[in-house]
Image (spheres, rainbow, N blue to C red):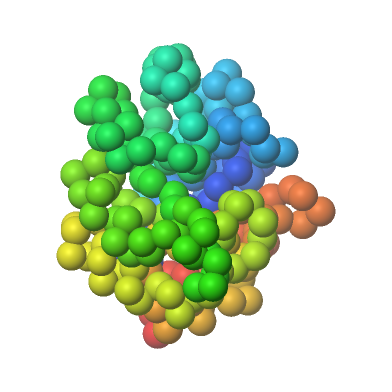
Amino acid sequence: MTDAGAPLVKICGIQEEATLQGMNGLPVDYIGFVFAKSRRQVSPERAAQLLAFARRTNMAGGMPPRTVGVFVNPTLETLADTLSRVPLDVIQLHGEETPAFAREVGERFGAEVWRALPVQEPDEASASGDAGGPARLADYRGAASAVLLDTAGGGTGRAFRWDRIPVYRKAAEALGLKLFVAGGLHPGNVRELIDDYAPHGVDISSGVETDGAKDNAKIAAFTERVKRQP
C-alpha cells in the first residue's frame, strides 16, 4: 500500500467518519476498532458503519486501510457475532488469551491474528505477564502473524523501555512474526523509535488525540514521520 521499506502504521480507536475522511491520501495501513471495554469502545453496528466508510477512503497508494478489531478475552461466540456484522481483516487479542485460543481463532474465522503482549520493566518481569520475555513468542508461531508489544496495562499512554525491543525483534523474525510497537508513541518520538529499533509496525491511539478525540493534524504528522525515508 505504501513504501515497502517503511514500518506499517495502525491508527487505533477509530470512532468517527471525520477521522477516516481526514486520513484520505495518508499512508495509513491499518485502522483499529476497539470492541473491549474502553472509552474508545464501539459496538459492532457502529464499527460496520465505519468500515463501510473506510472502504470508500483511499489511503496513499489508492487502497482503503485494512481493519483490525481489538478484543480482550473474548469468547468464540462473541467473535463470531462481531465478525458476522463486521468482516475484519485482523483480530487483535489483547488480554490473557492462550496460544491455543489464538490458533483456533485464526483457523475458525480465516482472519489474521495479532497477539498483544505486555512488556514489564526488568525488575518487575518475574512477577508479571512478561515472565519469559521474548521466549513467550515461540508459542505463537503459526498461531499469529504479528506480535504487538505494549506497556503493561495497555492504553496508559506510557512507553515501555525501548531497549528491550531488539531481543523481541530477533525472536519475532526467527519465528516469522511481524513485530509492532505500541504504548506512549506520538509524532515527537516515533522517528527515534524507528531509527534506533526498526520495528515492523507502530500502533497509536492516544498519541494522535487532542482532548480525547482523534486529531487529523497529529495523524498526518505521525504518518509522515513514520514513512519518510532516513
Task: Please give the name of the residue rendered at 42% of the width and 15% of the height, measured from the top-left corner.
Answer: 77
Whether residue 68 is visible, yes or no, is: no
Residue at the location (72% across, 38% down)? 39
Q: As displayed, is residue 102 above or below residue 164? A: above
Q: Nearer the viewer, residue 144 or 29?
A: 144
- Residue 71: give x, y in percent of width and height: 50, 34
**Displayed quadrant of residue 67:** top left
- Left or right relative to 160: residue 68: left
In this view, the residue farthest toward the front is: 127
Q: Position of residue 32 (x, y in %)?
A: 51, 42
Where in the figure is residue 21, as x and y percent of width and height? Answer: 59, 44
Compared across the picture, whether 69 is left or right of 63 comes to right
Q: Quadrant of the N terminus?
A: bottom left
Q: Taking 104 as reference, is 222 above or below it?
A: below
Which of these two is toward me, 139 or 35?
A: 139
Rendered-image quadrant of the C terminus: bottom left
Say whether residue 158 is visible.
yes
Quarter-wise, where is residue 185 in the image?
bottom right
Q: Residue at x 69, y 50 (%)?
A: 214
Of the pair 3 and 152, the residue shown nearer to us = 152
Which corner quadrant of the image does residue 215 belong to? bottom right
Residue at 47% across, 70% down: 226
Q: Position of residue 118 (x, y in %)?
A: 49, 56
From the viewer's perspective, is 69 left or right of 154? left
